[in-house]
Amino acid sequence: MNTQQMLRTHPDVRGHESEQLIRCIDECHACAQVCTSCADACVAERSVERLRQCIRLDLDCADLCLTTAALASRRTGSNEEVLRLTLEVCALACRRCAEECDKHASMHEHCRICAEACRSCQRACEEAVTDVGGGQQAH
Amino acid sequence: MNTQQMLRTHPDVRGHESEQLIRCIDECHACAQVCTSCADACVAERSVERLRQCIRLDLDCADLCLTTAALASRRTGSNEEVLRLTLEVCALACRRCAEECDKHASMHEHCRICAEACRSCQRACEEAVTDVGGGQQAH
Amino acid sequence: MNTQQMLRTHPDVRGHESEQLIRCIDECHACAQVCTSCADACVAERSVERLRQCIRLDLDCADLCLTTAALASRRTGSNEEVLRLTLEVCALACRRCAEECDKHASMHEHCRICAEACRSCQRACEEAVTDVGGGQQAH
Amino acid sequence: MNTQQMLRTHPDVRGHESEQLIRCIDECHACAQVCTSCADACVAERSVERLRQCIRLDLDCADLCLTTAALASRRTGSNEEVLRLTLEVCALACRRCAEECDKHASMHEHCRICAEACRSCQRACEEAVTDVGGGQQAH
């Protein structure tokens, strides 16, 4: 991903890009892909009846990750309080999804990988929150 | 929109659909369309330089509205704490977008309509929050 | 939805808005909601094992409908060949989803409603295609 | 990204994953991020009036890339004709966006990087098309 290069060349960011935000954007894209794949693989499993909650949390997590990546990518003007709260709810969605996937990790490799990706994305969102101002202009 | 009919026929919902959640889903779709249109119209305006913040908030609001609509539409299993926080951040994004659009409403009719749609969606999200359990199963 | 009002007040559209495109945007939002709900309801059904293909087509259709609505809402500049092809693939996704939902319509009311919404959206996309220029500027 | 691992562990894919499709999914996520960033950076530029068409094509391309990544990630059941056409329209959207970004590449580094990412994603979509069956079941 070229995320770092893109934020670096943004007219309002130059020289003030946040390493945490950049990593968070990349983790959100990676996690959205994994959650979309995991939901789809769960639907195909013979034990799909035991994976209903997993499918639900995967799909919710994928949606939130993509929205978080988009909001975190925008550096024109300021919407920092919204971004901060979005990062927080994304971190929670990742945590909930990881907890559910953990239950199926020994049976389904896609759930094991998904739990890992979700925890990694959760951490990245939590670290990015600390780097985003709340309520007032960040720049 | 067939939102009410769809939630009514969901195997886990039958007879317990939330009027507030249904209205919120429809408002989120309507608001996402208006914000996408408003951002695009702002880009086309001669005074685009004064509309940068408006474009930013429009795009953030559109993304959050679509994700909120998707999460609120899912009634299988439970992800109520995530849904509740998503409704709250969506309401805030709508409020911020309405405040910014208000500043341009006398000049640009699309901003006037967008401010109205955002406030309507904000209220719908706030009312839906009160109807969603937090942390534990809602049904 | 305020779609008509929004397109009417766009600086590049005034007086040249397309009724077909407006209806298509609204149908795409309605269809995306129905498909998201139908996929989620299918996951909750006891007969989920027979609904795998339905879930897949629902999710694909929902994604394409939202992207089509966003592209059709943008009237700044020109991307008409891309818009035309997107409307065509969206119409096909709606047709495939309707065909699959038809198979389950007698068992599941959500599939019956979804098949109807998909056919309605398919027609709206097909009619909008005829109103969009291909390859050259439309305005 | 864990895309390869995820597709490998899908119950309907095991041993038949497509290298082309995997690369295409990753390129679509990378391109969506870059296009979202480029649109946002263009809005912030002093010369925003000359970047209207660039912003439009960036946003259209980002939407199509994310939808293409989601569709290509789903391997349950079959929707191959829709996937094939989606890959084709995504490749075209990438080409159009690259052509426009090229015009501003000497002035704006984000446009130069975006043009490159779009061409890379275009090629990945075109190569993936050849690996997707059209009209009939792929598995």
Image: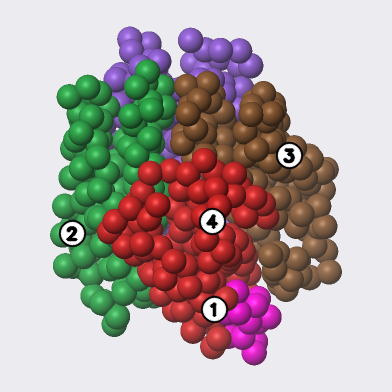
Chain colours: A red, B green, C purple, D brown
Query: Residue C80: which quarter of the image?
Result: top right
Q: Mark 2 and mark 4 in contact (Cβ < 8 Å)?
A: no
- Kind of residue indicated by mark 2: Glu
Residues flagged by tags 3 and 1 on a common chain? no
Tell me if label 1 and label 4 are in contact, CB under 8 Å: no
Question: Which amino acid lies under the numbered mark 4 shown in the image of this protein?
Answer: Glu
Q: Secondary structure at mark 2?
A: helix
Picture quadrant of residue C53 = bottom right
Query: Real-space Cα distance between discs 1 and 4?
Result: 24 Å
Which residue is pictured at 56% across the width and 60% down the height? A22
Residue A60 at x, y percent in the picture: 44, 65
- Magenta stretch prevailing secondary structure: helix
Q: Which mark is residue C43?
A: none
Please give the chain letter of the residue carrying mark 3.
Answer: D
Q: Assess disc 1: are there few (<14), some (14-19) or many (≥20) residues with their C-alpha within 10 Å of its C-alpha.
A: many
Instruction: Name the disc covering residue D116, or none.
Output: 3
Residue at which label 4 appears = A17
The residue beneath circle 1 is A119
Secondary structure under badge 1? helix
Depth check, mark 4 against mark 2: the one in front is 4
Numbered disc 4: secondary structure: loop
The span picked out in magenta is A104-118
**C75 left or right, relative to C86:** left
Q: Which mark is residue B126?
A: 2
The residues tagged by marks 3 and 1 sit, at their Cα atoms, a distance apart of 32 Å
